[in-house]
């Protein structure tokens, strides 16, 4: 079959592939503990579901404007002012079918063939692949656990060149859980001020799942505000993964470009989801805060359980719901049947031996690490890490 060469430009997301492998084993009767997918294990809050039910009864069942319903775009502006002290107008907002589409719209609107896009590692798996789809060039900047998996101003300055068009990052970060402080962002902003040709995509999808306190957006710095595109959505902070609703906030010209791109791919997002999103963004955040408090407890539980496993190096995540330990000490070891050469081997070993799913660090640009989600019950977390500990203990030099 003569398929398009377009498919050769990018890879399948490892997060989805590992989840599929786990589902296949589960379908065969294997008891799998899922630590691969980034999905809150909470139900959508009742007031949001009620808003969706009301929208159905009120017949909000027709096509929506490509950029989103007017009341939702206004609700996004309300949220950005309430939570981030940022002033945006509805014409600067584009609502999409998930934050992943918002990212795709932005990259396709900005990146031409040959443009360089700086992405600090580790990064969410889709960033680099979307750049490849746009025929841009990924310039990955390696960060380390010693730096908290955060890019330094010096690294950023050295990475920017004549072809640099865009810088992409997330805070809180998937997969490392790193959160940039206001002072750290200020130092990066000083670099961007010297390079006015560089745009910034700030992925803030984990904004509410922040164990350090209030979130700080890089868009809050006036000197670069007009070059920042905020990407956000409802999946993580409101436990609405299946509702598929993301949004972009940025300069009007880029918002219009994103609207043009989206108009040829999907048009407007789901009408019922949009009405539910208005309730999510304008109502009490108490359900979200309660969910985040539980994630904080689970984080401490995971870190405690990991302490009993030798040779794991893992910074405490300041946000999101993942741990991202360096597990390279186990490379080269074997249980007599399987030899671990790299993080991919280790993830597959844990899946088949311990029946725990994870995601290899290579997918995030960090080949020494493996990502484990703690978006699971405390009971499953305890059992999962007991299995991991037992499987790792079986490995010998």
Image (spheres, rainbow, N blue to C red):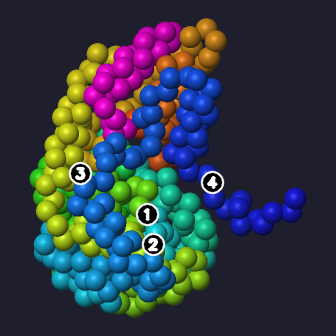
As for residue 346 lying within the magenta part, the answer is: no
SS for callout 3:
loop
Give the class, few, some or many, for how many residues have Cα within 10 Å of label 1's Cα (few <14, many ≥20): some
Q: Give the Cα distance between marks 1 and 2.
A: 8 Å
> In the rendered view, would you say 3 is above or below 223?
above
**Looking at the image, which is closer to me, 384 or 84?**
384
How many badges with numbers are in the image? 4
> Magenta stretch: dominant SS?
helix
122 versus 59 height, above or below:
above
Say if mark 1 contacts mark 3, CB within 8 Å. Answer: no
Pointer 2 or 4: first along the chain:
4
Task: State left or right for residue 320 relative to residue 260.
Answer: left
Q: Earlier in the sequence, mark 3 or mark 2?
A: 3
Mark 1 in CB contact with mark 2 (< 8 angstroms): yes
In the rendered structure, find residue 11 and report the number of the disc placed on it. 4
Q: Residue at x 58, y 77 (%)?
A: 265
- Local SS, label 4: loop
Q: Position of residue 218 (x, y in %)?
A: 24, 69
Assess disc 3: are there few (<14), some (14-19) or many (≥20) residues with their C-alpha within 10 Å of its C-alpha. Answer: many
């Amino acid at each position: 079959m003569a398929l398009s060469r377009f498919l050769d430009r990018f890879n399948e997301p490892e997060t989805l592939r590992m989840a599929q492998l786990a589902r296949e084993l589960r379908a065969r009767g294997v008891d799998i503990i899922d630590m691969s997918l980034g999905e809150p294990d909470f139900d959508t809050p009742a007031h949001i579901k009620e808003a969706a039910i009301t929208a159905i009864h009120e017949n909000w069942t027709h096509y929506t404007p490509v950029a989103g319903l007017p009341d939702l775009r206004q609700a996004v502006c309300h949220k950005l002012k309430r939570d981030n002290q940022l002033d945006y107008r509805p014409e600067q907002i584009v609502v999409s079918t998930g934050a992943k589409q918002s990212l795709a719209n932005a990259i396709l609107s900005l990146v031409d063939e040959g443009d360089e896009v700086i992405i600090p590692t580790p990064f969410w798996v889709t960033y680099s692949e979307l750049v490849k789809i746009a025929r841009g060039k990924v310039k990955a900047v390696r960060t380390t656990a010693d730096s908290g998996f955060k890019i330094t101003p010096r690294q950023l300055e050295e990475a920017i060149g004549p072809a640099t068009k865009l810088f992409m990052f997330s805070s809180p970060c998937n997969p490392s859980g790193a959160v940039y402080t206001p002072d750290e962002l200020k130092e990066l902003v000083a670099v961007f001020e010297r390079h006015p040709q560089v745009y910034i995509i700030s992925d803030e999808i984990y904004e509410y799942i922040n164990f350090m306190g209030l979130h700080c957006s890089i868009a809050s710095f006036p000197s670069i505000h007009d070059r920042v595109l905020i990407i956000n959505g409802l999946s993580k902070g409101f436990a609405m993964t299946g509702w598929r609703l993301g949004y972009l906030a940025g300069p009007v010209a880029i918002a219009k470009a994103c609207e043009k791109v989206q108009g040829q791919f999907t048009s407007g997002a789901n009408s019922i989801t949009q009405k539910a999103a208005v309730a999510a963004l304008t109502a009490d955040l108490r359900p979200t805060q309660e969910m985040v408090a539980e994630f904080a407890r689970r984080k401490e539980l995971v870190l405690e359980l990991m302490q009993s496993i030798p040779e794991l190096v893992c910074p405490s995540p300041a946000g999101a719901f993942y741990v991202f330990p360096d597990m390279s000490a186990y490379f080269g070891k074997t249980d007599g049947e399987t030899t671990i050469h790299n993080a991919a081997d280790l993830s597959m070993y844990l899946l088949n031996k311990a029946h725990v799913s994870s995601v290899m660090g290579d997918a995030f640009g960090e080949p020494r690490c493996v990502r484990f989600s703690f978006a699971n019950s405390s009971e499953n977390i305890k059992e999962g890490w007991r299995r991991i500990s037992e499987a790792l203990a079986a490995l010998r030099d």
